[in-house]
Amino acid sequence: MTTIAVLGKGRVGGNLARALTRAGHEVTVADRTPGAAADAARTAPVVINATPGAGSIERLSALRAELRGKILVDVSNATVDGPDGLPARLIHPGSSLAEQLQEALPETRVVKTLNTMLFPVMTAPASLTQSPTAFLSGQDPEAKQTVRELLADLGWRQEWVTDLGGIETARATEAAVLFVPHVMRSSGFAPFAVSINR
């Protein structure tokens, strides 16, 4: 059992919090207000960033002391939305939200994952007709192993998890969000994920 703080009470944060609680973890969910987020992060060794990516750097930089030494699991994408509310372009082209968070929080171990799928797949990967892939990006092997174990608790089989390497590899997975509007316009709001099939 791990104590986990989920920052963000939206669909992504709520979905992850419910699933991790069912798996036996002690989960605290905080909204975006600084006081609630600080209180939640202070006591949890693992913190999940499920806040809107456009404001994540400013929001989490304010928690630098609370996040020192913690594992920050970043599941967000930083995009500018188009008129239909779907992602239109990346806020950090040539970089990534995960890299920017790691730079802003050098004493925090940032791991990027679960950002290449619609949110229902994060906690129900076996619901798809083909095996999805969850990618890991981060500098710290121990932190990535902890995240692997949390993914297993969410139903991710180990062969469905691919470690891409350092935090800079999050550039590739974050760019995958640009698939989302085109797939949704083509197929509707049906759960899907980026998958590497061999």
Image (cartoon, rainbow, N blue to C red):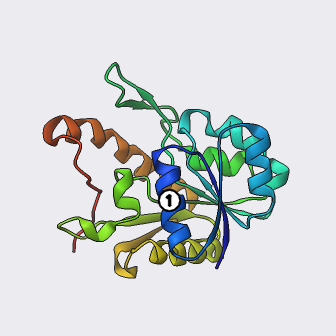
Q: Is residue 138 left or right of residue 129?
A: right
Q: Is residue 62 visible?
A: no
Residue type marked 1: Leu
Residue 15 horizontal/vertical position (percent):
46, 56
Residue 74 is situated, as x and y percent measured from the top left of the image, at 56, 54
Against 177, residue 102 (above or below) is below
Rendering quarter of residue 46: bottom right
Q: Secondary structure at mark 1?
A: helix
**In the foreground, 170 or 180:** 180
- In this rendering, the answer to whether 154 lies above or below 102 is below
Question: Mark 1 — residue?
Answer: 16
Residue name at image x 70 percent, y 38 percent: 59
| Residue 12 visible, this angle | yes
| Above or below, 11 relative to 125 | above
Left or right, residue 25 beside residue 115 = right
Image side of residue 40 versus residue 32, left or right: right
**Image quarter (top left, top right, bottom left or bottom right) of the N terminus:** bottom right
Image point 44% across, 71% down: which residue?
Answer: 154
Residue 55 horizontal/vertical position (percent): 61, 33
Residue sitting farthest toward the left: 186
Tag count: 1
Relative image position of residue 6 (x, y in whole percent) = 62, 55
Pointer 1 local density, CA inside 10 Å: few below 14, some 14–19, many at least 20: many
Residue visible at 21% across and 74% down?
Answer: 198
Nearest the camera: 32 or 161? 32
Q: Is 62 or 112 nearer to us in this picture? A: 62
The residue sitting at the right extreme is: 65
Residue 110, quarter of the rendered image: bottom right
